[in-house]
Image: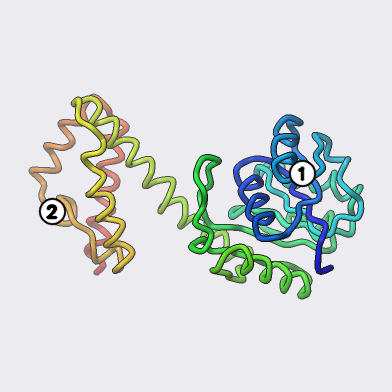
Amino acid sequence: MTEHPKIVVAGAGKIGTQLGRRLRGKGMAIAQVLNRTEHQAMVLGEALQAEWSGDWSAVVPDADWIILAVRDDAIAAVAEMLALYAPNALVTHTSGATPGTVLAPYFERYGVFYPLQSFSLERTPVWSKIPFCVDAVVQDDLFFLKKVAKRIGNLVYQVNDSQRAVLHVAAVFANNFSNHCYAIAEKILDDAELPFEMLHPLMEETLAKALLESPVKMQTGPAIRGDEETIQHHLDLLAAHPEWQNLYTLMTKNIQVEGKKQ
């Protein structure tokens, strides 16, 4: 890899946008932005002072590194298209759930550059706290990815496909499922004309404890106490929402089962 690689960001969504901004902010120029929707390609391309196109086939043929930041179900199809025009590039996708080997039929040099974080366009990531999970089939490329990850972040891990799949499942529980519980809690309070902000200190304290000690040891509430009277009262309050009742029952039983293992 050259000292100043020609970088292509393929995908102008949340991850592509945030990675592109960070790379450029750390002195790594973006040569080109590609995106299926031309307007998004233009917006990000102009922001990064890069060439842009809404056509995958317009990829610069001498690209050194293509960051494939597209939906999981589009990775293979986009890779197949890019391989026709830039076959010698190092290509890495940014997915936690998709194996790097999905790129093997199309590129000799491939890997994964996965920042373990939930990105949004409105918030600036705290890059020093984001774990970067990298992997590559060619050792020199792996060294390059580690070097870049260290340059734009701080926490760098070499994680293979099977490890990353497990990590992604854990992340869904820690992020997506917990956020869904927050959403349910917000709706419950809305129905009672109570502000969701009342739960903010509790949410902050729960996370602080989980970061300090094993979450298993920090578990509280009626389920772990075996408080059947309170549990039944809660179920009665959720009678108008049977799907929330079912989730409450399932999680209560699981907490109790896990608690008995300790």
148 vs 254, left or right, is right
Mark 2 or mark 1: name the one nearer the start of the chain. Answer: 1
Dot 2 corresponds to which residue? 226
Q: Residues within 10 Å of mark 2 (few under 14, many from 20)?
A: few
Q: Secondary structure at mark 2?
A: loop
Quarter residue 12 falls in: top right
Instruction: Give the CA distance from mark 2 to mark 1.
Output: 56 Å
Q: Amino acid at mark 1?
A: Val
Mark 2: which amino acid?
Gly
Q: How many marks?
A: 2
Residue in the image at 68% along x and 50% along y: 20
Horizontal side of residue 12 vs 128, given as left or right: right
Q: Which residue is mark 1?
A: 33
What residue is drawn where x is 57% and y is 64%? 153
Which label lies toward us, 2 or 1? 1
Which quadrant, please, contains the N terminus? bottom right
Front-most of residues 187 and 8 = 8
List x then y, in percent, for residue 70.
68, 44
**Badge 1, how many Cα within 10 Å: few under 14, some, many 20+?**
many
In x, y percent, where is residue 49?
76, 45
Q: Residue at x 60, y 64 (%)?
A: 133
